Amino acid sequence: MQDELEANYPGLGIKILGCNREGAESGNKSMTAGRDIPWLQDVDSDGDGASDVWTSWDVTFRDLVILNRENIEFGTLNLTTNTLAFPEIYNLVLQMFIDAATISGDMNLDGVVDQSDIRPFVDLLSNGGFSVAADVNQDGVVNLRDVKPFVDLLFGA
């Protein structure tokens, strides 16, 4: 998935990495075997008997936590109950990564909001579609109320 994101959406700068909880180090080798993914081992640096990162996110075993551009949790999906082997789950996770990294108004997903985003924005409005990028006022709908905020983004109003 990392290769696909980098090839198709290089401007979004999405990076996937793994994090293992304190006390589960024995699984690191099997999790990284044959994979090219940065892997972090969580620790208990404050000595409270719990993983520092793992417990701060309130996750369970095999949770995928997706952060947005501000490193705020965007969504969580458990990969035990939702296997990436199923195309619908794979595509859902792929879209979650894209949505989390998308800048409001960046219709062509190149990492910047500029005049090249105008045509895709107008096309989406005309076709009644939905895109996180086009929902500039973030009300859950793409409609004419998004036009002024979009123009303001483009021209710095």
Image (spheres, rainbow, N blue to C red):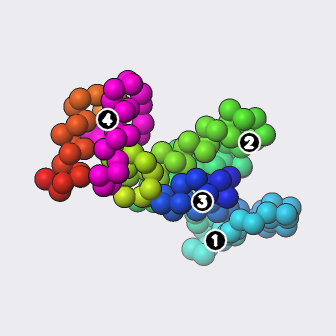
- Amino acid type of the residue tagged 4 in the rendering: Val
Q: Which residues are magenta?
A: 113-137
Of marks 2 and 1, the one in the foreground: 2
Of marks 1 and 3, the one in the foreground: 3
Q: Residue at x 48, y 58 (%)?
A: 12
Is residue 157 or residue 93 the one in the foreground?
157
Left or right, 137 with respect to 36, comes to left
Left or right, 3 with respect to 14, comes to right
Name the element at disc 2: loop
Q: Are marks 2 and 3 in contact (CB under 8 Å)?
A: no
Q: Position of residue 143 (x, y in %)?
A: 28, 28
Q: Is residue 30 above or below residue 152?
A: below
- Amino acid type of the residue tagged 1 in the rendering: Asp
> Callout 3: 10 Å neighbours few (<14), some, many (20+)?
some
- Amino acid type of the residue tagged 3 in the rendering: Glu
Task: Tell me how many marks there are.
Answer: 4
Q: Residue at x 23, y 51 (%)?
A: 153
**Residue at the disc numbered 2:** 84
Q: Residue at x 30, y 55 (%)?
A: 114
**Residue at the disc numbered 3:** 6
Q: Which mark is residue 44?
A: 1
Q: Position of residue 9 (x, y in %)?
A: 54, 54
Q: Position of residue 90 (x, y in %)?
A: 68, 40
How far apart marks 2 and 3 lie (CA) works out to 18 Å
Q: Position of residue 137 (x, y in %)?
A: 26, 39
How far apart marks 4 and 2 lie (CA) works out to 34 Å
**Residue at the disc numbered 4:** 122
Q: Are marks 2 and 1 in contact (CB under 8 Å)?
A: no
- Amino acid type of the residue tagged 2 in the rendering: Leu
